[in-house]
Amino acid sequence: MRSVFALVLLVGLGLAGFAAMQTHQYISAMQNELAHARSKANNVEMVNVFLTSRSLRYGEHLMREDVLVAPFPEYAVPQGSYTDLDQLFPNNATHRIVLRAMDPREPLLVSKLTEPGKAAGITSLLSPGKRAFTIAVNQTSGVAGFLRPGDHVDIFWTGRTANSGEMTQLIETQVRIIAVNQSADMDRTASVTDARTVTVEATANQAAALAQAQNSGRLSLALVGIGDNAATGAIEMTQDRLLGIVREESRVEVAEKCHIRTRRGNEMVLIEIPCTN
């Protein structure tokens, strides 16, 4: 009996020792992996990014003394950031002009500054090949004054045509607003503004179409939601379609024509004569 007890005790001690050894090896492996991960984290590639040192508003000058530099992990550098001072102030430029408001220690982005040497006017906001076209609006056609530079709108034309009478038709979609009244500031207060004119970005063909539409009828704007890129097909609305009126097609009575055949020389000709019942 004692020998059996001793054997069981010996086996138990062996199993306990084996378990302890396995646990030690597992913990050591985990510690090695953690140390390797920490070492790898400490070797992250860093990039110097230029920041603003103070609050900046639309139209202000960004000077060299307004710029800070801070290291960013390469994978976290914001798109459009400046990582080279010569890119930010090329050709020994003394300043850049702010297009969008920025808070202190915010990365300087290409989209928030004018091109070197350019003023913060409408021309600095136009994409290559685009034109600025101004549309006269009121509280109704201008979305009750809620339009802001940077918004996108659909443009509707209302006027009369020879065939269908008064109608409304979608003529342009997803057109970007670059100014409201005489302001291109995208960071204006959110309070409602009594818009009298809205300046949009358009191609030369779009500008010509808008000019014709504005001179031949009324233009109305519809604000497009942020991120709404859904394709919009042709939209046309007439008074009859609006009210569900279906008009019968008018039949045009064609007058009966009567003819007689007669010979003139060697030719047979057809001569129209009054019809008799």
Image (cartoon, rainbow, N blue to C red):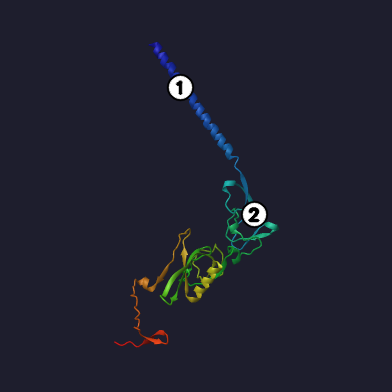
Q: Position of residue 74 (x, y in %)?
A: 59, 46
Q: Which residue is mark 2?
A: 67
Question: Looking at the image, is 96 positioned above or below residue 30?
Answer: below
**C-alpha span from label 2 to label 1:** 64 Å
Which residue in the rendered view is the most extreme toward the left?
A: 277
In terms of image quadrants, where is residue 129? bottom right
Question: Looking at the image, is 236 positioned above or below residue 33?
Answer: below
Q: Mark 1 packing: few (<14 Cα in 10 Å), some, or many (20+)? A: few
Q: Which residue is mark 1?
A: 16
Q: Nearer the viewer, residue 245 or 63?
A: 245
Q: Is residue 159 left or right of residue 112?
A: left
Q: Nearer the viewer, residue 80 or 128?
A: 128
* Residue 180 visible in this rendered orientation of the protein: no
- The numbered mark, 2 or 1, whose residue comes first in the sequence reads 1
Residue at x 47%, y 65% (from the top left corner) = 223
Residue at x 64%, y 54% (from the top left corner) = 67
Query: Disc count in the image?
Result: 2
Q: Position of residue 260 (x, y in %)?
A: 36, 86
Q: Position of residue 213 (x, y in %)?
A: 49, 73
Residue type (three-letter) at the residue carrying disc 2: Val
Residue at x 60%, y 66% (from the top left corner) = 123
Which residue in the rendered view is the most extreme toward the front?
A: 266
Residue type (three-letter) at the residue carrying disc 1: Ala
In terms of image quadrants, where is residue 247? bottom left
